[in-house]
Amino acid sequence: MIPSKPIKRFTGILLLTFTVLSSLTAQTNRFAARKHIVAGDTLAYRLLVPDYDTMRKYPLVVFLHGSGERGTDNEAQLKWGAMNFATDQAMAAHQAIVLAPQCPPGARWDNFERAGSGSRKLTLKAEPSKQVAILIDLIRQLTKQMAIDTNRIYITGLSMGGFGTFDIIQRYPSLFAAAVPVCGGGDSARAATIAHLPIWVFHGAEDPSVNVKMSDDMVNALTTAGAHPGYTRLPETGHFAWLAAYTDSLMIEWLFRQKKK
């Protein structure tokens, strides 16, 4: 009996779905699941390691997820963005160690004082969030244990992770070689402290969740402080600006060219 065209089409769809899922699973498995404990507090994280050669030094990419990926499964943080660094093509083009921590439920990466509902003003509090304090300790430990090029440590994050990216580079401005905050915001009054740092900001012009003017404010403040930030303000794009950000080959090439001066 010759299969009908609908059956052939359905079989093809199943095969394609299986192939895609298998590919995603394989990429997820490239991130080793680990935990870092400081004074009894635990930070779960995933670590992607390239074709490792201890005779070489590798850049480190720190990836901060958004609020929807908080949890305890040590997997949800790979849902958006992080996997773009784990494809065959990405790993062949740029061998890098990628660190993707997971923020626990109810917690945040950033620790900003918010002026109130509807206000865009953020003020950096004196102390980092518990999660960031542990993360910085982890980064410093990894740089001692692994072949990491400390002149090429990058940080990026989306939504809550975009706020976290601005928070962290404003607290530790000498640690990183470049930053890519996606649909986030920061303390514009402290822009001068990161004016030396190469930064490329992404935001959707129609973002209903995070006001695009929060990125506008940071870019304007950085420019006033003498910086030359990149800014991709995506037209007709809502909150999912990261879909464009992490598939932007120009941004990726730019990121891996950056070195601390």
Image (spheres, rainbow, N blue to C red):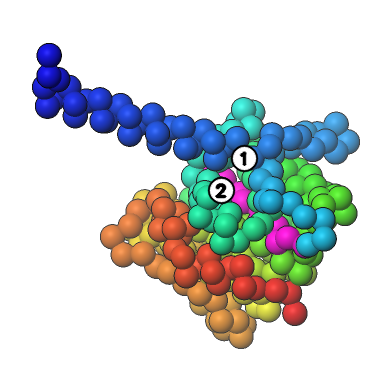
Q: Residues within 10 Å of mark 1 (few under 14, many from 20)?
A: some
Regarding mark 2 in the picture, which secondary structure is present there?
Answer: loop
Check residue 14 in the rendering and tell me which mark sits there, or answer none. Answer: none
Asked whether the residues under the numbered discs 1 and 2 touch, taking CB atoms below 8 Å apart as contact, a structural biologist would say: yes
Residue at mark 1 to residue at mark 2: CA–CA distance: 7 Å
Q: Amino acid at mark 2?
A: Ala
Q: Amino acid at mark 1?
A: Arg
Q: Main secondary structure of the magenta part?
A: strand
Q: Nearer the viewer, residue 190 or 114?
A: 190
Q: Which residue is mark 2?
A: 86
Check residue 30 in the rendering and tell me which mark sits there, or answer none. Answer: 1
Q: Say whether residue 57 is left or right of residue 234.
A: right
| Residue 29 on the magenta segment | no
Q: Is residue 35 shown to the viewer in this render? A: yes
Residue 148 falls in which quadrant of the image? bottom right
> Residue 234, percent across and down?
36, 64
Q: Quadrant of the C terminus?
A: bottom right
| Residue 63 on the magenta segment | yes
Residue 220 higher or lower than 161, as above or below: below
Q: Is residue 161 shown to the viewer in this render? A: no
Q: Residues within 10 Å of mark 2 (few under 14, many from 20)?
A: many
Where does the magenta region start and end? 57-66
Residue 43 falls in which quadrant of the image? top right
